[in-house]
Amino acid sequence: MALIVQKYGGSSVADAQKVMNVAKRIVREKDKGNDVVTVVSAQGDTTDHLIEMAKEINSHPSKREMDMLLSTGEQISISLLAMAVERLGYPVISLTGPQVGIKTSSVHSNARIISIDITRIKKELQKGKIIIVAGFQGVDENNDITTLGRGGSDTTAVALAAALKADFCEIYTDVDGVYTADPRLVPQASKLKYISYDEMLEMASLGARILHNRSVELAKKYRVPLVVKSSFGDNDGTYVKEVEKVEDKMVVTGVAHDTNVARIAVLGIKDKPGMAYKLFDLLAKNNIDVDVIIQSIGREEDKDISFTVSSSNLEKALELIKENLDYLEARGVKYRDNVAKVSIVGAGMVNNPGVAALMFEALAEANINIGMITTSEIKVSCLINEEDVEKAVKAIHDKFQLHKIHQ
Ligand code: ASP
Ligand code: MG
C-alpha cells in the first residue's frame, strides 16, 4: 500500500461536474488500496475574483486581510470535493491549512512553510479516511492565516508529501505535462517525459507557470518524486526526478518566458564600496525579490546599477528607492515595465560553450534587441521588449530544434 499526495489545480475543480470527476479519480486510487491525501486549489478564477472584490473596496488593502479573504477560495473547494467523495460512499474529511498544522512565516501573501504537524492527518488516515487539504494556506505564530503566494497549492502538496514521506506526489493540472515551451506560443513544442529537479526549478522560476517554484525547491530538497499530469485524461505526464537519473542529458531542455518583469535603473550611484549592499539590502528588507543585476563600469565618480523585479513589485520598489535617494547617494531612478525575460534551460549546457551564442544568434536573426543577459550553469536569460516575446520564444525553440526532442 502506497501513500499518494495528489494536487488538483483550480481548473480541475472549476465546476460541480469537474469536482465529481476529481472525486472519482481520488476514490479510484483508494480502491487500489492506497492512502490518499489530496490538496486542492480554489475553483477556477475564484482567487482573481476575490482580488477584484477587495479592490472595489480598497485599492491598497493590508496583506493580512487579503490572506483572510483569499484563503476562503480553497475552503470552498475542499468542502465541495469532500461532499463529492461522500456522495461516492467513501469516508473523507476536509481540513484547512491551520487544521493540518501548516505553520508558516508571517510574510502575508508570500509566506513560507516552516513546519507541518502530521499528527492529525495520520490519525485520520488510520481511520481509513481520504483527506482533502486546502492548498495555498497556513497559519503563522500569531495564529493568523497566511497564504503562500499565487500558485502556492503546489507547494502545500509537495511539503505534505515530504512531511508524510509519501511514495509519490502527483500534480494534476489542465495541461498534460511540461513542454519544451509554452504550447500556446509554440504549438510544435514537445512534451517532456522527464526533467531534472534543477531544470524544473529554473523553468518554474523563469516563468513557466506550470509549477510553483518553491514546490520544486522542496521536491528537490526532500527528494519527493513528482509527476505533472492532466486531470482530464489518462496520459503519462512529466516526471521530475534526480539529474543523475536523467539519461542522455539534452543540451537545452526548454525555453521559458516571463512577462511579469520590470527593469529599474538606479543612476549616478557613488563609485565606492558598500553601495550595492545598501541598495539590495533595502530591497530585501522590504521583501522585494531582485533578479537580473547589472552594474555599469564606474565613470568619473559614479556608476549605474540596473536590475529587474516582478511587475507587481515595481511600484513598491520605485517608491522605496525614491524615498531613499539620499541614503543611497544616487542621482535618480528610471524604469521600464514593458520588458520580458526569455530563457533557455538545460542541464547539458555546462559543457557546451556555444549554447549561449546560438541563443543570441536566434534573437539576432529575429531582429530582437537584448537589454540584459544573465547566465548560470544551466540557464541563459535575456531581457527583451515585451512585444517581442512570442517571436523570441519561437525563434529560440526553432534554433535548438526542440520540436524534435526524443527522450
Ligand atoms: N488559489 C491560489 C491561486 O490562484 C493558489 C493556487 O491556485 O495554487 O493562486
Ligand atoms: Mg498552478
Image (tube, helix red, strand yellow):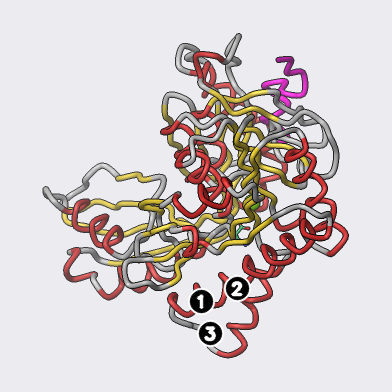
Q: Residue at x 52, y 24 (%)?
A: 356
- Can you give x and y, in whole percent of width and height, for residue 238 in the image? 69, 29
Is label 3's Cβ within 8 Å of ligand 1?
no
Amino acid type, callout 1: Met
Q: Residue at x 59, y 28 (%)?
A: 240
Q: Residue at x 30, y 45 (%)?
A: 295
Q: Which residues are magenta?
A: 394-407
Amino acid type, callout 2: Thr
Distance (Cα) linking label 2 and label 1: 7 Å
Location of mark 2 (residue): 72
Instruction: State whether residue 323 appears in this view.
Output: yes
Marks 3 and 1, the one that precedes in the sequence: 3
- Can you give x and y, in whole percent of width and height, for residue 108 in the image? 41, 68
Tell whether position 332 is magenta: no
Is residue 134 depicted above or below 51 in this figure?
A: above
The residue at the far bottom in this view is: 57
- Can you give x and y, in whole percent of width and height, for residue 205 in the image? 51, 43
Checking the image for residue 59, the label placed there is 3
Marks 3 and 2, the one that precedes in the sequence: 3
- Can you give x and y, in whole percent of width and height, for residue 16 in the image? 84, 64
Amino acid type, callout 3: Ser
Tag 1's secondary structure? helix
Question: Left or right of 175: which side holds 126?
Answer: left
Q: Relative to the observer, which residue lies in front, 201 or 142?
A: 142
Question: Left or right of 270: which side holds 352?
Answer: right
Q: Quadrant of the C terminus?
A: top right
Location of mark 1 (residue): 68
